[in-house]
Image (cartoon, helix red, strand yellow):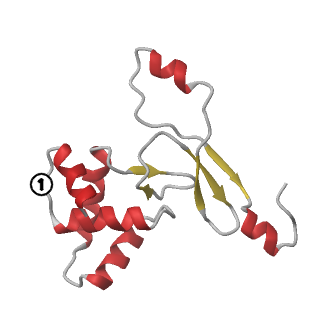
């Protein structure tokens, strides 16, 4: 929890149990959950937790650059504790979203320019190796 406390304090944010729990949850669940799935999971541990608190806290953490919002297909946002610039792979069979750490050939030039890069969206869509294995196909 110390790490999360320092991240909040570094941004000048008040340290609250809700903020700490949401950060902990996202750090421990790197499967890019939605706000609703975060709310449902944390509600089991804390029945007095409100949906509005979770949604507002997620938005604040996103605005402060502590978490990243990911939109792959459709309007639903997924959240990622890894807030560094990176890409994602989406499995169209099982819906898994996986972080992809590859070098973007254009990013260095953009970062040297006059623009301020806040987000990079590079999404790969296909079938993950787990689903391919279930189909009896080896990963290529």
- Write the residue at 46% across / 65% down: 33
Residue 14: x and y, percent?
12, 54
Instruction: Work out whether 84 lies above or below 74.
Output: above
Quarter of the image for residue 51 reads bottom left
Residue 44: x and y, percent?
32, 84
Quarter of the image for residue 74 reads bottom right
Tag 1: Cα neighbours inside 10 Å, few (<14), some, or many (≥20)?
Answer: few
Residue 119: x and y, percent?
44, 37
- Write the residue at 19% across / 44% down: 10
Quarter of the image for residue 117 reads top left
Q: Secondary structure at mark 1?
A: loop
Instruction: Work out whether 118 lies above or below 46.
Output: above
Q: Nearer the viewer, residue 55 or 2?
A: 2
Instruction: Please state, as top left, top right, bottom left or bottom right, where the C terminus lies in the image.
Output: bottom right
Left-right relation of 4 to 29: left
Instruction: Please state, as top left, top right, bottom left or bottom right, where the N terminus lies in the image.
Output: bottom left
Please give the residue where the numbered disc 1 appears in the rendered image. Answer: 14
Instruction: Work out whether 103 lies above or below 138.
Output: above
- Write the residue at 39% across / 62% down: 27
């Amino acid at each position: 929890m110390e790490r999360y406390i320092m991240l909040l304090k570094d941004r000048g944010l008040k340290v609250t149990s809700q903020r700490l729990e949401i950060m902990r949850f996202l750090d421990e669940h790197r499967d890019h959950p939605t706000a609703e799935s975060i709310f449902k999971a944390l509600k089991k541990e804390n029945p007095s937790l409100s949906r509005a608190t979770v949604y507002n806290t997620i938005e604040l953490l996103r605005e402060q650059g502590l978490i990243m919002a990911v939109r792959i297909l459709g309007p639903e946002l997924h959240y990622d504790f890894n807030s560094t610039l990176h890409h994602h792979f989406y499995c169209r069979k099982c819906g898994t979203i996986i972080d992809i750490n590859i070098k973007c050939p254009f990013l260095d030039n953009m970062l040297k320019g006059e623009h301020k890069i806040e987000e990079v969206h590079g999404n790969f869509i296909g079938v993950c190796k787990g689903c391919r294995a279930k189909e009896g196909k080896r990963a290529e």
